[in-house]
RNA sequence: GGGCCGUUAGCUCAGUCGGUAGAGCACCUGCCUUUUAAGCAGGGAGUCGCUGGUUCGAGCCCAGCACGGCCUACCA
């Protein structure tokens, strides 16, 4: 059942019928415009007195008896229409009087300036291009309700200039990332989203089913294992910008579908990736903010290189003390002492050393990393795809990127020793068998690829949505995703 | 999962002590040929998120539910 539209809506519909009776097609086909609104405004000195044709949505109307004004908004801005009965004729003026705010129209007429100096079009011919049947949100306050803004993003975009700006910036950011990498001879790749075995991160996956293959498939949680196959294949520098899917909780920085940039560079290591990260962020900040400094939610950020590099174990020692790192038992005690909840004291139920380190990082270290920081050199236990450091076999060459307390990316010197990779994934498979749904599975084809020889390689993943949040001063990830995941509205 | 808050006209919001539902915008009518949050006069517009309860009487009090927001927890 369609719910009744309401009185204003009934009247808009009645106007539609009146227009049809007057022989007006309320939904005609193409319309040729000569100028965008901003072109007329910017080039007014040259265009004054000449004829222009513009089109857009009427966002305000001001009637004056036998004349009227409307604000016509198009993709680049707004221009005022001035409609006079003695200019358009009785027939068109009658049509004008049946239009409302929200209707989409085309107008041909002379560019001129009003008495108050506003560039306008003195309309000679007005064409209805689409009749609106529902009223727009309030013109002064815009659409404020967050739920409605997410669910009906089109209204948010019509009403709120800031929302349009966020998504324009998002488009630029993605474009700059692509340009940055293509300039450096990276090849853009598209790898499978539907995967029989998922890997490359710790996360629960969405499951689906392919009917004609009668095959269980997963939506990818990362691009990693396929992009590395391309490195084996000889492309040497590859990247992908695309959606990953993780079947987990949602909050200010987590969305079940999100956009990730992953890149892999043969003959590089994580040090090269750190330099690449710094260059990319500097480039993004310069293009969006004109320099390396900007603010996010009141915090001053400066992405100028070089960024701080802090070893994970040093950061943890700073919080819990050096002695705590000598054994798992000592670390457990120290973690409890600083207030972390670790569950029951049964040793086999406690997290491993690596997981403890990670928990301490999450709770006590990362939130404080406001200025851009690379946390480097992670425990091997929680990094099954990264290569060990030369001086400590329990530590891998890996970093994560933090700005404003938010994790923005993850990178390592990629593990390319196939036998070691089998051992690492084997440990993951055991964890999964023990009930850890987020542990990796064994990907035999990936292992086979490594056995053919993958060059030493540096890899980097960056959370694009979070980068957009940061650079657009948006408080949450839903504010930078056009149509964020929502529970359906209950319909009666 | 837990806590707090919200849900009233298409939108933005009021709603006092529990006593017949309000404003502005939008829409419609009238006047108005340089206005711009145009103006003036008038009009129509409601399942007060849903279900139950208390009460002579509920938008308001109580309980449950739904959806959302913020925080928190979990989760690479």
Image (cartoon, rainbow, N blue to C red):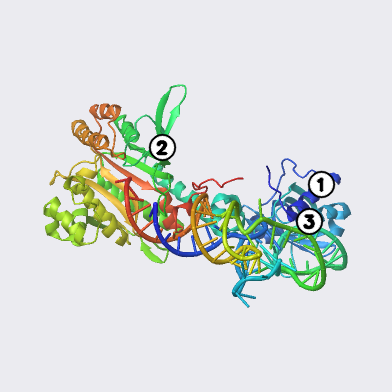
Front residue of A115/A155: it is: A155
Q: Which residue is mark 1?
A: A17
Q: CA distance from mark 2 to mark 3?
A: 55 Å
Residue at 85%, 62% in the rendered image: A66
The N terminus of chain A, quarter of image = top right
- Label at residue A123: 3
In x, y percent, where is residue A4?
A: 71, 49
Q: Where is residue B49, by image quadrant? A: bottom right
Image side of residue A122 versus residue A411, left or right: right
Q: Earlier in the sequence, mark 1 or mark 2?
A: 1
Q: Which of label 2 and label 3 is nearer to you?
A: 2
Up-down: is A247 above or below A279?
above
Image side of residue B13 versus residue A246, left or right: right
Residue at 23%, 27% in the rendered image: A451
- Label at residue A206: 2
Q: Earlier in the sequence, mark 3 or mark 1?
A: 1
Q: Where is residue A164, by image quadrant? A: bottom right
Residue at 74%, 43% in the rendered image: A27
- Label at residue A113: none
**Are marks 1 and 2 in one subunit?**
yes
In x, y percent, where is residue B76?
A: 33, 45
Q: Chain of mark 1?
A: A
In x, y percent, where is residue A320?
A: 18, 60
Front residue of A482/A354: it is: A354
């Amino acid at each position: 059942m369609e719910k009744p539209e309401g009185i204003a809506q009934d009247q808009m519909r009645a106007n539609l019928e009146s227009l049809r009776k007057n022989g007006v097609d309320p939904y005609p086909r193409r319309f040729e415009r000569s100028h965008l609104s901003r072109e007329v405004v910017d080039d007014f000195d040259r265009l004054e007195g000449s004829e222009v044709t513009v089109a857009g949505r009427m966002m305000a109307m001001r009637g004056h008896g036998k004349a009227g004004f409307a604000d016509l908004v198009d993709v680049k801005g707004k221009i005022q229409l001035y409609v006079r009965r003695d200019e358009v004729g009785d027939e068109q003026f009658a049509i004008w009087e049946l239009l409302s705010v929200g209707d989409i129209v085309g107008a041909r007429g002379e560019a001129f300036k009003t008495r108050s100096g506003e560039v306008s079009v003195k309309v000679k011919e007005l064409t209805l291009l689409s009749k609106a049947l529902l009223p727009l949100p309030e013109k002064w306050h815009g659409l404020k309700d967050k739920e409605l803004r997410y669910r009906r993003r089109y209204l948010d975009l019509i009403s709120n200039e800031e929302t349009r700006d966020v998504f324009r910036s998002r488009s630029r950011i993605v474009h700059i990332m692509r340009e940055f990498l293509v300039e450096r001879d990276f090849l853009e790749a598209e790898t499978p989203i539907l995967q029989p075995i998922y890997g490359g991160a710790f996360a629960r996956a969405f499951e689906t089913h392919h009917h004609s293959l009668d095959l269980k498939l997963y939506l990818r949680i990362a691009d990693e294992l396929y992009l590395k196959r391309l490195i084996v294949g000889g492309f040497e520098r590859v990247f992908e910008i695309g959606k990953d899917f993780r079947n987990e909780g949602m909050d200010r920085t987590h969305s079940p579908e999100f956009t990730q940039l992953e890149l892999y560079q043969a003959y590089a290591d994580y040090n090269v990736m750190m330099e690449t990260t710094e260059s990319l962020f500097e480039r993004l900040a310069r293009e969006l903010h004109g320099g390396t400094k900007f603010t996010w939610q009141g915090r001053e950020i400066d992405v100028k290189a070089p960024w701080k590099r802090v070893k994970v174990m040093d950061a943890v020692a700073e919080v819990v003390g050096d002695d705590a790192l000598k054994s798992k038992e000592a670390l457990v005690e120290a973690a409890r002492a600083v207030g972390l909840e670790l569950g029951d004291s049964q040793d086999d139920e406690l997290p491993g050393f690596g997981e403890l380190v990670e928990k301490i990082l999450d709770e006590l270290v990362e939130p404080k990393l406001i200025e851009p920081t690379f946390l480097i050199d992670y425990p091997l236990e929680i990094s099954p795809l990264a290569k060990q450091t030369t001086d400590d076999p329990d530590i891998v060459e890996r970093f994560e990127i933090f700005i404003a307390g938010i994790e923005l990316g993850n990178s390592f010197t990629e593990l390319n020793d196939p036998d070691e990779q089998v051992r690492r994934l084997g440990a993951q498979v055991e964890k999964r068998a023990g009930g850890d749904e987020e542990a990796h599975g064994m990907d035999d084809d990936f292992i086979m690829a490594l056995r053919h020889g993958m060059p030493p390689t540096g890899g980097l993943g960056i959370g694009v949505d979070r980068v957009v949040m940061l650079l657009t001063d948006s408080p949450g990830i839903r504010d930078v995703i056009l149509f964020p995941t929502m529970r359906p509205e209950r319909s009666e």
